[in-house]
Image (cartoon, grey):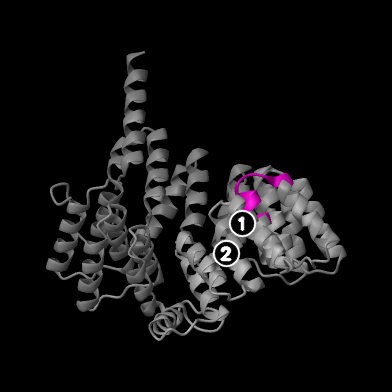
Amino acid sequence: MELRGIQRDIINLSILINSFYHLCQLNYAFSVLAKILKIGYQPDTVTLTTLLKGLCINNEVKKALHFHDDVIAKGFRLDNVSYGTLINGLCKSGETKAALSCLERLKGWWWLSQISLFDAYDLYCEMVVKRIFPDVVTYNTLIYGFCIVGQLEDAIRLFNEMRLKNIVPNVCSFNILIDGLCKEGDVKGGKSVLAVMIKQSVKPDVVTCSSLIDGYFLVKKANKARYIFNAMAQNGVTIDLRSYNIMINGLSKAKMVDEAVILFKEMQFKSMTPDTITYSTLIDGLGKLGRISYVWDLIDEMRATGRSANVITYSSLLNVLCKSGHFDTAIRIFTKIKDKGFEPNMVTYNILVDGLCKNGRLKDAQEIFHDLLIKGYRLDVRLYTVMINGLCREALFDEAYGCTPNAVTYEIIIRALFKNDKNKLQ
């Protein structure tokens, strides 16, 4: 960097750490961190989380814990994403107790229905020591905790332990476990828990059905999802807004948008008011199929009903406009939402820059990209790769070399250079 005249600042060094992480070169990443600290710069939370994640992925969880303690001792801050990364790594390596202990630091971020997971775990341990049986609330809290950190085997173990100790699971117990299994794509496991639920005369409710519907869409079984949705009313289960949103989202992603629109109209007929999630999902689904006029109708309807668009809505709209070639409109809306005080996320920027690059609007893409750099935004590798791909399309290889790469980025540059040399030979 220094030999090429690139300024050695915190942004460039942080990007370098991220790149070394993606290239699985953790030793180099930590060397850069040492350089940052030596110069006197302050690494941000994202950089520290990247290093934590790298250690966990390489099964070096003890080093990750030591790094965590060192970071805290030096006065740096970690957030819920940092702890989620560490907890996930600990759980996957079998260090469940250490993972649950880490949740104490998340107190105030993750609150469960009655007591926090950390308090529940302490209470549970104390009860076991004193030979007092925990109640259903304690078990539900712990089962939920294990589910959110992806430790389903422990969640199932606790569920079975609860039943063996003659503590009767309630509808919440079953729903937590069914939802956890379905979110991991284990719908078969979710159905097995449902069978136990019915056998114990616990009536499935709207949460149970919604979890199964979501799970079936996740494993690309739309017909089974539709069957459960249609059976809900027949079995006396009241369909709520969340159920409709799950169905509309699943159908849209399965490119069954016409059915999604029918459900959208059905919920309005039943005097159920669609929310921003409903509109954003449909806008995204219709846009991906090129049905622009329907998208604008939905935008107008949102305005008329007083629904506020969010970043997801605008990202979906920009994606639609870029794919349909309406770049001037996309840039105008992008500017408008920033003027309104909305802060676009990296997904939004990726969509816009990618669309502009792919359609020869490289100057506009570069202006957005450079504006982000000047304002100190932390750009992800995907955005760099998108920009480099656009530069290579125009044979601007020197500019492409100036961007921080990952493995995919190198592949793009090599492929473009090879194609350029091949054209020169012809």
Is the residue under label 1 in contact with that under label 2 (CB below 8 Å)?
A: yes
> Residue 408's spot in the image, x, y percent?
36, 39
Q: Find residue 34 and report its image quarter.
A: bottom left
Residue 258: image x %, image y %? 78, 46
What kind of residue is marked 1? Gly
Q: Main secondary structure of the magenta part?
A: helix
Q: Percent position (x, y) of residue 384?
A: 37, 48
Q: Quadrant of residue 130?
A: bottom left
Name the one closer to the observer, 125 or 31. Answer: 125
Residue at 49% of width from left, 55% of height from top? Answer: 347
Query: Which portion, as a residue range, is magenta?
Result: 213-223
CA–CA distance between discs 2 and 1?
7 Å
Which residue position holds label 2? 177
Image coordinates of residue 68 in percent, x first then y, are 25, 70
Which amino acid lies under the numbered mark 2 shown in the image of this protein?
A: Leu
Q: Is residue 158 magenta?
A: no
At horizontal 39% and vertical 75% (from top left) the residue drawn is 103
